[in-house]
Amino acid sequence: MSYSRSTASRLMKIFREYGPILSSTDGEEGSNGAPVQHLNYTQGIALFGISVEDRDQFIADNDVGKMSKRELQQTVKVRERTAEEEERREPENQGVQNQEKTEEAADKAMDKPLELIPVERKIIKPKTVPTAQTELPQEDANPESMKYNAQYATHRDTMLSAYGELLKTLVALNRVDPVKKEANRKEALKITTNMAETLKQYPPAIKTNLKIKRTEPGAPN
């Protein structure tokens, strides 16, 4: 009898898979008591999808001998899909386990008492801001001088503050009325120019109309 190449290949595989059991002389069944000897050709081929280690248990659990060809093929396919899903889930389960271990280790670390790290503290001395009083020379103890110098410092600070506010006002006015801003700027420039000229020598030298005749030493009056 001649067989096709595919049929011959299946028969050879059946012999490799089931030969040791089918050729048993004492008529014993498989290791788990499954009736491997009673499988037909079609059932034997369908069970190629089950590993040798799991085949006996599969036959016993599903009563393969009473299944039709279609039922057996469907059951094998379902088992294969289940096994593949388990294999895919294995890395996910491993990842979950690793995450749980990491979280557990973090929880244990949080439970440990904190170790205080010594901190070196540097004392920063506050800077001394010069005032009207500190600007005075130490040897100047004239009370009148101290009074007027303090007044000068007050007026100076007031003038500087007012000057800063004036500049801000010019900027704001320039946004709404540039012409009026320019007129005010010129007026402020004229005022400050006059002030600067006045401060070049102040107070001014006293002028008098009296003429004083100078005489040489030793000359007759």
Image: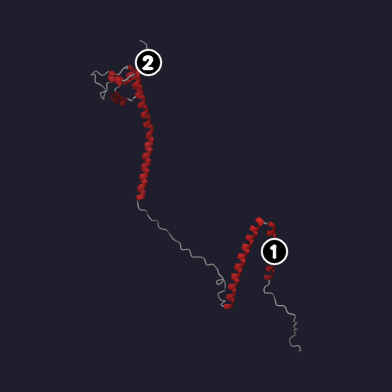
Query: What residue is shown at x 60% (from left), y 65% (from top)?
Result: 161
Tag nearer the camera, 1 or 2? 1
Of residue 172 and residue 161, the one placed in the foreground of this image is: 172
Question: In terms of image quadrants, where is residue 180?
Answer: bottom right
Tell me the crowding category of disc 2: few under 14, some 14 to 19, or many 20 or more residues within 10 angstroms, Cα based.
few
Residue at 61%, 70% (x, y): give it: 155
- What mark, if any, has residue 178 been given in the picture? none
- Is 152 placed above or below 114 here? below
The residue under label 1 is 187
Q: Position of residue 192 (x, y in %)?
A: 67, 66
What's the amino acid at mark 2?
Thr
When the figure is inspected, residue 27 is found, relative to residue 157, above or below; the finding is above
Q: Amino acid at mark 1?
A: Glu
Check residue 7 in the rendering and tell me which mark sits there, or answer none: 2
Residue 142 in sight from this viewpoint = no
Pick the quarter of the image with the N terminus. Answer: top left
